[in-house]
Amino acid sequence: MDFMRILQSLEGFLYEVMTWLIFYPRTMWRSIRHPVQMLRYSDRELNDPLEDRFADTLSPPLFLMLTILLSHAVEIASHQALPHVASPLGRQIMASDQNLLILRSILFAIYPLMFALRRLQRQGAALNRETLRKPFFAQCFVAAPAAFAIGVGTIIARAHVHWVALAGAFLVIGAVVWYLWIETVWLHSHARMSWFAAFRSALGTWLLASLINSVISFVILGT
């Protein structure tokens, strides 16, 4: 009986992983092509029963984590040396792909978290685990494409060929501009803010998230 339960668990796991091959590119395409609609889509899906949520896409946090995993795989395939870290904890993290992947997932998740908090603040809603879930899930949809472009762009920017490194830098800048534009459009339409106020809010939130990201990186990695 225990053996049958193990087989059933493996069947479910295998099926779930295989569906990623279909729904991951579909989710990525929709997030790039219709990012604002995906923000609204996430809000609607979380109103459905648990078993019916995100039936035609990946769940947003899983989508973000798989995207960071894919970016990490690109880095491994590029055979580039990882940046030097100063702290013993940082060296221990960098020595393990699993630990590094967890750290990067946390660092990138700071951005959807901060934009989710800003949305709750604009709505005047109480902050708790349930009210934070809906905006955080939605923000993961638009954070993932930006995270992948920034991750790959950073890898390319470390190339020794000047024009290749420059292309990587432009990819990072383009990803940040795209991300800020989507957040500006979302705040303008959802929070009924003026274009200038929406951009200022998006930029301020992004800068705060980047500051927190940098502080955590410095404390853990020493760089």
Image (cartoon, rainbow, N blue to C red):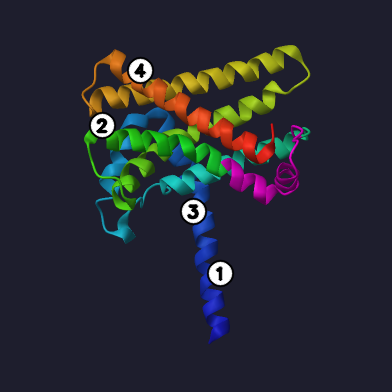
Which residue corresponds to mark 3? 19
Of labels 4 and 1, the one closer to you: 4
Give me the C-alpha separation between circle 3 and circle 2: 37 Å
Secondary element under disc 2, as helix, strand or loop, is helix
| Most common SS among magenta residues | helix
Q: What span is colored magenta in the figure?
A: 82-104
Look at the image and tell me in which quarter the C terminus lies. top right
Give me the C-alpha separation between circle 3 and circle 1: 14 Å
Of labels 3 and 2, the one closer to you: 2
Of labels 3 and 4, the one closer to you: 4
Secondary element under disc 3, as helix, strand or loop, is helix
Which residue corresponds to mark 1? 10
Q: Residue at x 78, y 19 (%)?
A: 160
Disc 2 residue type? Arg
Q: Residue at x 62, y 25 (%)?
A: 153
In the picture, residue 172 is in which quadrant?
A: top right
Which residue corresponds to mark 4? 200
Secondary element under disc 1, as helix, strand or loop, is helix
Which residue corresponds to mark 2? 122
Q: Residue at x 38, y 33 (%)?
A: 115
Above or below, 160 against 220 in this view is above
Disc 1 residue type? Leu
**Label 2 crowd bin: few (<14), some (14–19), many (20+), radius 10 Å:** few
Where does the image place residue 74, in percent across and percent down from the top left?
67, 36
CB atoms of marks 3 and 2 within 8 Å = no
Give me the C-alpha separation between circle 2 and circle 1: 44 Å
